[in-house]
Structure formats: C-alpha cells, structure tokens
C-alpha cells in the first residue's frame, strides 16, 4: 500500500541481525557489508513480506517476527521462493 523505505547499511546497528523492519515508520534497514547480492535481495524481500503482513493485519502488535512464528516463517519462505525464481531466470544473479 505504501512505497517501502529501504536503507542499506555498512555498519550493523545494535540488536540487528542482517535486516529489520520498523513497524512504527515502515523503514527497512538492510546490512550489506560483505554479503552476496542474492542474500541482500533475499533480506529485502523478507522485510517486504513483513511490510505486507503489517498492512494486512488489523492490530500491528499481533505481528510476530520471532524465530519460528508463522509471520517469520512466511517471510522466510516467500523471500526464498522469490529469490530462487529470479535466480532461475537470471543465473548470473548468483555470481
């Protein structure tokens, strides 16, 4: 529903893994230093799934991004699927 705000970082912020999505302002932060392009794109896709989940859920506090939660598993699965589909069409993506 709204254009994503994506910030690519070369310095990881405290409490950050490789990416995060801020429910409050819709901002995605993606850590890019020493990561393959396909992995960076997978992180962006993952966070965009979270944005879509946030837009579709009536109560944003119900969005659970903890490891193993349905929301996190959906973001992992869809991001992985998108990257594999893209890589199949454009194999050089993995180089």
Image (cartoon, grey):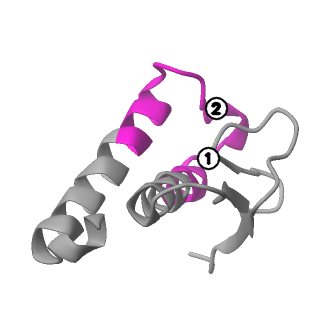
From the viewer's perspective, is 81 left or right of 60? left
* Secondary structure category for the residue under label 1: loop
For this orientation, the residue located farthest to the left is 88
From the viewer's perspective, is 44 left or right of 62? left
Say if 36 sits above or below 12 in the image: below
Task: Please state, as top left, top right, bottom left or bottom right, where the N terminus lies in the image.
Answer: bottom right
Residue 2 image-quadrant placement: bottom right
Magenta-colored span: 48-76
Look at mark 1 in the image and give the residue it sits on: 58
Say if 68 sits above or below 14 in the image: above
Look at mark 2 in the image and give the residue it sits on: 62
Q: Position of residue 95 (x, y in %)?
A: 29, 67
Give the residue drawn at x 64%, y 32%: 62
Q: Using the image, tell me which numbered label, if any, was put on residue 81.
A: none
For this orientation, the residue located farthest to the right is 14
Give the residue drawn at x 46%, y 59%: 36
Q: Is residue 78 magenta?
A: no
Residue 90 image-quadrant placement: bottom left
Front residue (pair 58, 72): 72
From the viewer's perspective, is 84 left or right of 9? left
For disc 2, the neighbor class at 10 Å (few under 14, some 14 to 19, many from 20) is: few
Q: Position of residue 82 (x, y in %)?
A: 27, 60
Q: Main secondary structure of the magenta part?
A: helix
The answer to whether mark 2 and mark 1 are in CB contact below 8 A is yes
Q: Is residue 50 magenta?
A: yes
Give the residue drawn at x 51%, y 50%: 53
From the viewer's perspective, is 47 left or right of 91? right
* Secondary structure category for the residue under label 2: helix
The CA span between labels 2 and 1 is 8 Å
């Amino acid at each position: 529903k709204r254009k994503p705000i994506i910030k690519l970082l070369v310095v990881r912020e405290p409490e950050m893994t490789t990416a995060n999505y801020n429910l409050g302002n819709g901002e995605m932060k993606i850590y890019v230093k020493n990561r393959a392009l396909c992995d960076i794109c997978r992180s962006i896709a993952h966070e965009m799934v979270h944005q879509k989940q946030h837009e579709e859920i009536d109560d944003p506090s119900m969005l659970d991004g903890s490891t193993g939660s349905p929301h996190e598993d959906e973001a992992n699965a869809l991001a992985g699927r998108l990257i594999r589909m893209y890589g199949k069409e454009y194999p050089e993506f993995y180089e």
